[in-house]
């Protein structure tokens, strides 16, 4: 078996392993520019098919690190004008106040919006700037709702 055959066999075994564990097919490690690519950093791809895992899985919506400052401002502005999105958490005195970190601010309000609107993939799109992750992005006292 050549190198290509060995790689193909490995990929097949990996897929069988994921199916046997009933892990969502969409929860495969993907190349995510701007992240540290640690093996435990999983990002949900655009594949909506899941195998054996119900809607009870824990997911969060965060912003892509490559998002421009202008888009970050637009996302924060949009989310903070939506009903029930409490943006006090990213303001001075709030549990997620981290100036001048617009990526953090946008991620916090995007996740609030995502959860208030039913945790649908499309509620985390933000014109291509959102990522659905399965690893809790909470930091210190800034707790992201799951």
Image (spheres, rainbow, N blue to C red):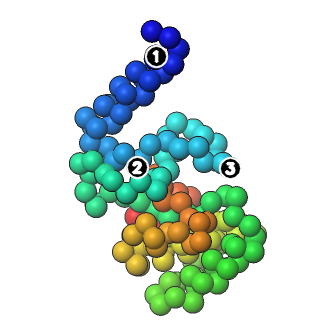
Q: CA distance from mark 2 to mark 3?
A: 20 Å
**Residue 146, percent across and down?**
40, 64
The answer to whether residue 142 is visible is no
Q: Which mark is residue 6?
A: 1
Going from N to C along the chain, the mark reached first, 1 or 3, is 1
- Categorize mark 2 by other alpha carbons within 10 Å: few (<14), some (14-19), many (20+): some
Q: How many marks?
A: 3
Q: Relative to residue 71, is residue 41 drawn left or right?
A: left
Residue at position x 36%, y 33% in the image:
15
| Relative height, residue 43 to residue 143 (above, below) | above
Point out the frontmost of discs 1 and 3. Answer: 1
The answer to whether residue 109 is visible is yes
Q: CA distance from mark 2 to mark 1?
A: 24 Å
Residue at position x 33%, y 36% in the image:
18
Q: Secondary structure at mark 3?
A: loop
In the depicted view, which residue is nearer to us: 79 or 92?
A: 79
**Residue 142, percent across and down?**
55, 66
Q: Quadrant of residue 100?
A: bottom right
Q: Secondary structure at mark 1?
A: helix
Residue at position x 75%, y 70% in the image:
69
Point out the frontmost of discs 2 and 3. Answer: 2
Q: Give the labeled residue for mark 2.
A: 26
Q: Give the labeled residue for mark 3.
A: 34
| Relative height, residue 67 to residue 14 (above, below) | below
**Residue 2, percent across and down?**
50, 11
Point out the frontmost of discs 2 and 1. Answer: 1
Going from N to C along the chain, the mark reached first, 2 or 3, is 2
- Categorize mark 1 by other alpha carbons within 10 Å: few (<14), some (14-19), many (20+): few
Going from N to C along the chain, the mark reached first, 2 or 1, is 1
């Amino acid at each position: 078996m050549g190198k290509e055959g060995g790689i193909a066999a490995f990929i097949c075994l990996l897929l069988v392993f994921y199916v046997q564990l009933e892990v969502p097919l969409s929860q495969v490690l993907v190349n995510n520019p701007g992240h540290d690519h640690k093996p435990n950093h999983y990002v949900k791809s655009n594949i909506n098919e899941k195998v054996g895992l119900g809607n009870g899985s824990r997911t969060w919506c965060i912003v892509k690190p490559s998002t421009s400052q202008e888009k970050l401002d637009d996302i924060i502005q949009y989310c903070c004008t939506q009903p029930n999105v409490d943006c006090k958490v990213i303001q001075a005195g709030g549990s997620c106040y981290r100036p001048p970190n617009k990526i953090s601010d946008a991620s916090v309000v995007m996740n609030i919006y995502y959860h208030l609107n039913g945790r649908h993939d499309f509620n985390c799109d933000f014109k291509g700037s959102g990522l659905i992750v399965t690893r809790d992005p909470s930091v210190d006292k800034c707790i992201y709702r799951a």
